[in-house]
């Protein structure tokens, strides 16, 4: 059986023309110069908008301490 009001390929593809994915914007960190997503904290240095938000050195120290504790067990 044939569908009476069939949507042609061109009509279907015109409808889907707005479904394309767009790459996210990348900003340059003011502190270290590494690229990061816009409006987010730089995961390389922990700065955002000229202010220190994350203490990444403490975060790394905590992670290494936890790994050494689990290695002892």
Image (cartoon, grey):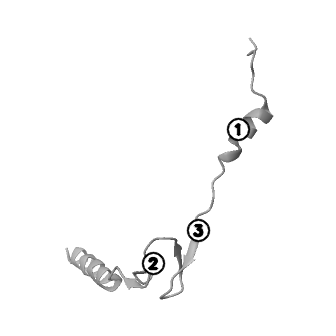
Residue that appears at 75% across and 39% down: 14
- Sequence order check, earlier mark of 2 and 1: 1
Residue 31 percent coordinates (x, y)? 47, 88
Q: Quadrant of residue 60?
A: bottom left
Q: Name the side, left or right, on which 33 lies relative to 17.
A: left
- Sequence order check, earlier mark of 3 and 2: 3
Quarter of the image with the N terminus in it? top right
Secondary structure beneath dot 3 equals loop
Label 1 with label 3: CB-CB less than 8 Å:
no
Which residue is more in the foreground, 60 or 21?
21
Label 3 with label 2: CB-CB less than 8 Å:
no
Give the numbered dot on residue 42: 2
Find the residue positioned furthest to the top. 1
Residue that numbered label 1 is attached to: 15
Give the numbered dot on residue 25: 3
Find the residue positioned furthest to the left. 73
Please determine whether, in this image, residue 33 is positioned above or below residue 22: below
Residue that appears at 56% across and 76% down: 27
Distance from disc 3 to disc 2, alpha carbons, whole Å, reads 14 Å
Please determine whether, in this image, residue 63 is positioned above or below residue 15: below
Distance from disc 1 to disc 3, alpha carbons, whole Å, reads 26 Å
Residue that appears at 32% across and 83% down: 55
Distance from disc 2 to disc 1, alpha carbons, whole Å, reads 38 Å
Q: Quadrant of residue 21?
A: bottom right
Which residue is more in the foreground, 26 or 44?
26
Q: Quadrant of residue 54?
A: bottom left
Residue 64 percent coordinates (x, y)? 29, 81
Please determine whether, in this image, residue 7 is positioned above or below residue 24: above
Report the mark closest to the observer, 2 or 1.
1
Quarter of the image with the C terminus in it? bottom left
Secondary structure beneath dot 2 equals loop
Secondary structure beneath dot 1 equals helix
């Amino acid at each position: 059986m044939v569908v009476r009001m069939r949507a042609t390929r061109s009509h279907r593809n015109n409808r889907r023309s707005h479904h394309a994915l767009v790459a996210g914007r990348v900003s340059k960190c003011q502190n270290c110069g590494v690229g990061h997503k816009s409006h987010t904290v730089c995961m390389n240095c922990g700065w955002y908008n000229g202010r220190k938000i994350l203490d990444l050195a403490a975060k790394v120290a905590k992670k290494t301490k936890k790994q050494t504790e689990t290695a002892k067990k």
